[in-house]
Image (cartoon, rainbow, N blue to C red):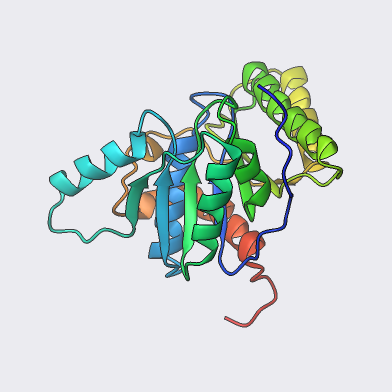
Amino acid sequence: MSIPIFNIGRSPKKNKIIVFANQKGGCGKTTNCVMFADQLVQKYQHRLVMLDADPQRSIVKKHEQDLERWPQLQPLYQVVPCTQLDSEMDTHVLIRAMRNEDFDFIIDTPGSLTLQGLLPLVFEADAVIVPIQLEKTSINSTTSFIEMCAMVAKENGTNKLPNFYFLPNQFNKKWGRKDEIIEQQGFLDNFARLGTVLPKIPNSAEIQRYSTLYLTDKQHEIIDKCYDMLHDCIYNTKGKAA
C-alpha cells in the first residue's frame, strides 16, 4: 500500500462524519457502530445515514433482517452500502457529497487498510471511534493502525492525528491477574496520549442482541456511560444548556 498524499482537514464542515475503524476483526466495530447510531437517533434525535463500507455488508444484511423480523417498526435511519473507498479521488468526491447534506453520517469501515480511499476518510472525519479489546493481539493491531495514520500525517506535512476515541469493548472485569490488569491500564494510558479513552463496555450477551431498529432498556444501562460521553465530545454539548 502506497502512502496517500492529500489535503488533510480541508473539507468544509457543516455536519458530522463519524467513522468506526480498526484493523482487528472481532473487536466490536460493527456492533458499536450500529448501537451508537441507534443512540444518536433514539436518545438525541439526530438525523443520520449509515454507510456500510465493509465488503461483507454486515450492517446492510442485519438491517434487512431486522426489517423483515419487525415490519411494524419504523427504521431509525437509512442504511446504504458504500463502495466509494477504492481510491483517494473517489473518497474526496464522497466527502464533498456528505458535507453538502444537512444530516450526519456514521460509517462502518473495512477491517483493513488496503483500500486507498480509507485513510483520507479517516483524516476528514469529525470523530474516529476505535473499538479495542484489552488483549495483546487487539492492542498490537490498533497500534499498527495508529502508526499508519501517523506516517500518513507526516507524509502530508502535519503531525495532527485524526480525532481518535478509543472504546474498550467486550471488557471482563473478572479476567486478568494483577500484572495483566496493570498492563491493560498501561495500554489505555498510552492511547490517552493519542486521543480520548472512553469508559469500558463490558462483555454482555445483551450487547450481542443488538438491532438497527431499537435499543433495549438493558442495553442503555450497559452503553449509556460510554456513548453519552462520546456524544458530548463529538457534539461539544458539555456545559451547554439542555
Q: Quadrant of residue 240?
A: bottom right
Quadrant housing the C terminus: bottom right
Q: Is residue 89 above or below residue 170?
A: below
Q: Is residue 22 above or below residue 167?
A: above
Q: Residue furthest bottom?
A: 241
**What residue appears at the point 53 percent right and 51 percent down from the top-left corner?**
93
Indicate the position of residue 189 as horizontal and vertical percent values: 80, 36
* Left or right: 155 in relation to 223: right
**What residue appears at the point 26 percent right and 58 percent down from the top-left corner?**
75
Q: Is residue 152 above or below residue 227?
A: above
Any part of residue 104 in sight: yes
Indicate the position of residue 22 as horizontal and vertical percent values: 59, 32
**What residue appears at the point 70 percent right and 75 percent down from the top-left corner?**
239
* Left or right: 60 in relation to 163: left
Any part of residue 221 in sight: no
Quadrant housing the N terminus: top right
Indicate the position of residue 84 as horizontal and vertical percent values: 47, 41
Q: In this view of the protein, which residue sits in the foreground, 41 or 106?
A: 106
Q: Quadrant of residue 55?
A: top left
